[in-house]
Amino acid sequence: EAGVTQFPSHSVIEKGQTVTLRCDPISGHDNLYWYRRVMGKEIKFLLHFVKESKQDESGMPNNRFLAERTGGTYSTLKVQPAELEDSGVYFCASSQWGGSGNEQFFGPGTRLTVL
Amino acid sequence: AQKVTQAQTEISVVEKEDVTLDCVYETRDTTYYLFWYKQPPSGELVFLIRRNSFDEQNEISGRYSWNFQKSTSSFNFTITASQVVDSAVYFCALSEGRNFGNEKLTFGTGTRLTIIP
């Protein structure tokens, strides 16, 4: 069974440009989460999808970030326009719906560098 | 608000030594879940263990063991007879149990463990 995949693995862009990150969750996982780790700090929650619906987007930094999950399958996270402080590693995780304390399976992350 | 503290930023030990990674958490919830994840050099986060707040039994899995103590709000992780392959960043995390279906994780800042051959 394929795990969570993320594309690209690395992205280097200039301030003001746009970048789109993609996450493919494990097949059948309704929950999809985005997290971000900035400059060696803790990994912070960004938002949570249940299927195609945004369940919680309280962690989104500002309106330059837009997340979508069309058809409840893969998800994209767009940053437009990118700023220097957006640099970091963006992780995606998925888990099954139902129950509590479900294990979240993480992807390898996308390392974003904004110059 | 939830918080997870991993006070040890970096630890280095010689191979075959035992090492304990500390994790202290804060939450107002009576139902919650604690996790440990390992991040090897390849970058992905690998799930190691989950513990719910009602189960204070310690757990052992091979060379790994976990000590959950609600009285001190700690969930420490011990590696016995460490090996070079244990070198990684280890994250402790917490999720609330009351928000059914929305279990965002609150992470600590991680502990970088280096095992010296």
Image: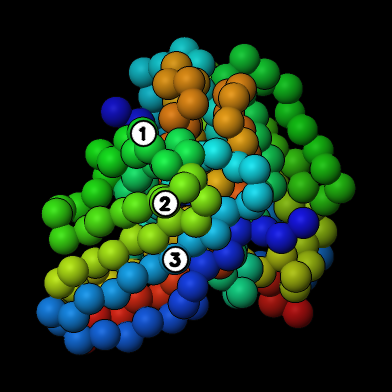
Report the front residue among A70 and A102.
A70
Name the mark on residue A22: 3
Secondary structure found at label 3: strand
Q: Is residue A103 above or below residue A44?
A: above
Residue type, mark 1 in image: Gln
Mark 3–mark 1 Cα distance, whole angstroms, equals: 19 Å
Residue A17 shows in the view: yes
Dot 2 surroundings within 10 Å: few (below 14), some, or many (20 or more)? few
Q: Which residue is mark 2?
A: A70
The reply to the same-chain question for discs 3 and 1 is: yes
Q: Which residue is mark 1?
A: A55
**Label 2 or label 3, whichever comes before in sequence order:** 3
Residue B92 position in % (x across, y down): 52, 45
Q: How many marks can you see?
A: 3
B72 relative to B14, above or below = above
Name the secondary structure under disc 1: strand
Per the model, the C-alpha gap separating discs 2 and 3 is 12 Å
User: What residue sits 39% from the left and 60% below the top?
Assistant: A76
Above-or-below relation of A109 to A48: below
- The chain to which mark 1 is attached is A
The answer to which quarter of the image holds residue B77 is top right
Q: Where is residue A87, by image quadrant?
A: bottom left
Q: Residue at x 73, y 52 (%)?
A: B79
Q: Position of residue B102 (x, y in %)?
A: 44, 30
Residue A102 left/right relative to A63: right
Instruction: Choose between B54 and A68: the one closer to the eye.
Output: A68
Q: Is residue A104 visible?
A: no
Instruction: Name the quadrant containing residue B117.
Output: bottom right
Q: Which residue type does callout 2 highlight?
A: Thr
Disc 1 crowd rating (10 Å Cα; few below 14, some 14-19, many 20+) is some
Chain ID at mark 3: A
Of helix, strand and loop, which one carries label 2? helix
